[in-house]
Image (cartoon, rainbow, N blue to C red):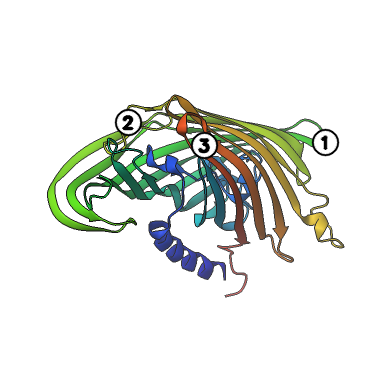
Amino acid sequence: MIKKIIVSACLLLSLVSFAQEGTASPYSYYGIGDVRFKGTVESRSMAGVAVEQDSVHINLENPASFANLKLTTFTLGGTLNTVQLKSDTKTESAKRTTLDYLAVGLPLGKWGVGFGLIPYSSVGYKIESLAEDLNTNNRRYSGSGGLNKVFLGVGYKVTPGLSIGADFHYNFGKVETSSLEFITDVPVGTREMNTSILSGVNFNVGAMYQTNINKKLSLYTGLNYTIENTLQSENTRNISTVISNAGFDLAVVDVLGEQKSNVDLLFPGKVSLSAGIGEAKKWLFGGKIAYQKTAAQANSYNESDNVGYGKYGSVSLGGYYIPNYNSFSSYTKRIVYRGGLRYEKTGLVVNSESINDVGLTLGLGLPITGLYSNVNVGFEIGKRGTTNANLVQENYAKISVGFSLNDKWFQQRKFD
């Protein structure tokens, strides 16, 4: 049954990853868009802390975790995001529903293999700037698209407490942006359209280690490093004269020309360190820190004098609690209760203001009776950005649902 689900879900996510508009953030204009992949629902519910060597859940951020799987694991997750966009003078709201990831993990003795598809970043905005006087032009901006990742990873169990791994990511995507400028009461304006075809590869390496402190407590640690990589962007720019109306619909009068260029976007290496302490299948409390020298880089269509890209950094605290994982009399005692708190410095600087993100996360792991599979529900509330310097503050609330389905494959037949 799980094989049929995997095939169907792969086809569904492959189609949806191209079609979905995964964000409504005006900050998705910059860099490669709004980076919305934060791990599986299980780890996101703990603010990104996923340091335990789990045998039935995939850790998509550390390839060493594949070596710890005991069952074939299929995982799929999606999110409903409600966001309030607030400036000094106006407030708007938006909703987006997205599929976040699809992955399969296969245990092969001391080895483990993982592969899947991740919609990594999204571009999705519509911004209108109306003229305050005759000396200022009206402007409208819109954008859509994003970056996706197909990955293949392998992990190896060096010792009972130490596993290592590496994975390969092929990055691909398309971003389309449009900017329109016109004078009040004049129907004819100028439009610039940009299309960027993105492609590239990157590699991650990771390690996970655990050791017993005493009969009950264990220490867990993890390390993940994304090697410096380059994303190629094939850009096409079209400038045209258009007739505008009150909405975003336009009629093209004359196309002035097409320009093509190639841009290499360099992303420095990124390192994350995790550590935690807890009692296996009972509770865990841990933390995670991540650092990257430069978070993003401007493309030819989104360069701006008032925008810079600095260092990325994040700090997370989180954990889980299970009252009694093998209780036969009480279902609620087998539920996994998760929570966490995170602070993220995105590295984006607009009008000399750093765009930061802080969030509180909660979650539940709901076991499916009679199986090792479970349904995971995550909740997150947070704030990104600021209303200072004529910017936009995003107050968001997210509900995520993930499925971790487990089965045993490759069993040797006792009877032919």
Query: Looking at numbered disc 1 in the image, what kind of residue is underneath it?
Result: Lys
Residue in the image at 81% along x and 58% along y: 332
Q: Is residue 270 above or below residue 10?
A: above
Which residue was labeled with disc 2? 304
Q: Is residue 210 above or below residue 243?
A: above
Residue in the image at 61% along x and 45% along y: 44
Q: Is residue 200 above or below residue 1?
A: above
Q: Is residue 192 left or right of residue 158?
A: left
Which residue was labeled with disc 3? 88
- Numbered disc in front, either 2 or 1: 2
Query: Looking at numbered disc 3 in the image, what kind of residue is underneath it?
Result: Asp
Mark 2, Cα crowd under 10 Å, few <14 / some 14-19 / many 20+, is few
| Distance between mark 2 and mark 1 Cα atoms | 58 Å
Pointer 2 or 1: first along the chain: 1
Pointer 1 or 3: first along the chain: 3
Question: Dividing the image into 4 quarters, which one contains the N terminus?
Answer: bottom right
Which residue was labeled with disc 1? 215
